[in-house]
Image (cartoon, helix red, strand yellow):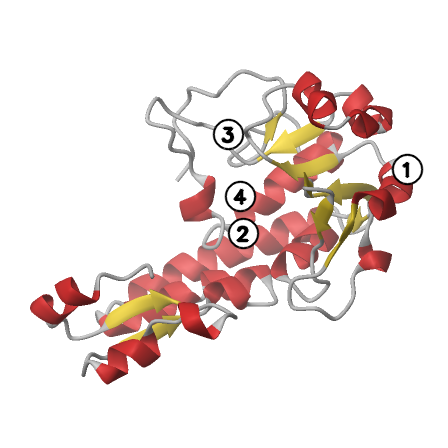
Amino acid sequence: QHLDMEALIALRPDVIMSYWSAVPEFNAPAKLDELGLRGVSMLGHWERHPVGGLEWVEVVAAFANHEARANALVAGIRARYDSLRHAVATVPPRVVMHGMPQKDRWSLIRLDYAFHRLLQDAQLTYAFADLVDGAAFPQTDLESVLPAARRTSLWLGVSSAWRTTADITASDARLAVLPAVREAQVYTLDAHRDADDRYPYPEQWLFRPDLYLADLIAVGHPAQIPGHRFAFLRRLGDGPATATPRR
């Protein structure tokens, strides 16, 4: 549904790189094959290690004979990621919650996801790990997450539709009891939103795990990364950032 097949037939490109989904009807390569077009599935978002998504830069570069440039780029970002990870390796972990309710359902992080590994490398413990089952897209109900949510003062990954903690409690009064809400330690992913409603996270998270890791460390262990300037995360209630995001 996200490819204009008629336009692609007219263009007849050498190769079409398309998103891959766990839901077969959303996968384009099979349909492209039927039309005689060569499709390549891009699977970086399914990698189980944060640097795995970054390495897909090398896959793309191979199609354009830019392997050397891509290898150097990947090596530099991987080195910074490892440096950050090692810098906090002995710091006592903090517990964090992630996500938000959707009609009384709460989406959970699979424990084999790259994001879960990011949390671990930032010395953050996922509050709802015991609730995750083997489903492709694990979910539970709000009542099930509340006991663990009441034992952490950090909340990540909420919608940018919530601008303040008052918006959270207005959406569901039960959330007012959470320490993260009372202490205003709630973070969304729309830092550096501009006048056209654009911000770096959607385009950069997969290929800049070093920026994401640094943000997570700054949230959970600010003393370990003083003066950090967030690339993706924004504390709820803070005004929209106007500075140019780091590249």
Specify the label residue 209 is tagged with: 2
**Distance CA(mark 3)–CA(mark 4):** 12 Å
Identify the residue shown where x is 81% and y is 20%: 182
**Distance CA(mark 3)–CA(mark 2):** 16 Å
Tell me the SS state at disc 4.
helix
Tell me the SS state at disc 2.
helix
- Judge left or right: residue 164 versus residue 92: left
Specify the label residue 151 is tagged with: 1
- Residue 58 in sight here: yes
Identify the residue shown where x is 34% and y is 63%: 70
- Judge left or right: residue 82 versus residue 132: left
Specify the label residue 211 is tagged with: 4
The three-letter code of the residue at mark 1 reads Arg
The three-letter code of the residue at mark 3 reads Ala
The three-letter code of the residue at mark 4 reads Leu
Identify the residue shown where x is 69% and y is 33%: 219
Q: Nearer the viewer, residue 3 or 67?
A: 3
**Distance CA(mark 3)–CA(mark 1):** 26 Å
Tell me the SS state at disc 3.
loop
Chain-order first, disc 3 or disc 1: 1
**Residue designated by label 3:** 191
Task: Please rate how many residues cluster around mark 2, counting C-alpha atoms within 10 Å: few if below 14, some from 14 to 19, many from 20.
Answer: many
Residue 195 in the image, given as x and y percentages of width and height: 34, 22
Identify the residue shown where x is 53% and y is 43%: 211
Q: Nearer the viewer, residue 25 or 146?
A: 25
Foreground mark, 4 or 1, reads 1
Residue 112 in the image, given as x and y percentages of width and height: 69, 67
**Distance CA(mark 4)–CA(mark 1):** 27 Å
Chain-order first, disc 3 or disc 2: 3
Chain-order first, disc 2 or disc 1: 1
- Judge left or right: residue 23 versus residue 162: left
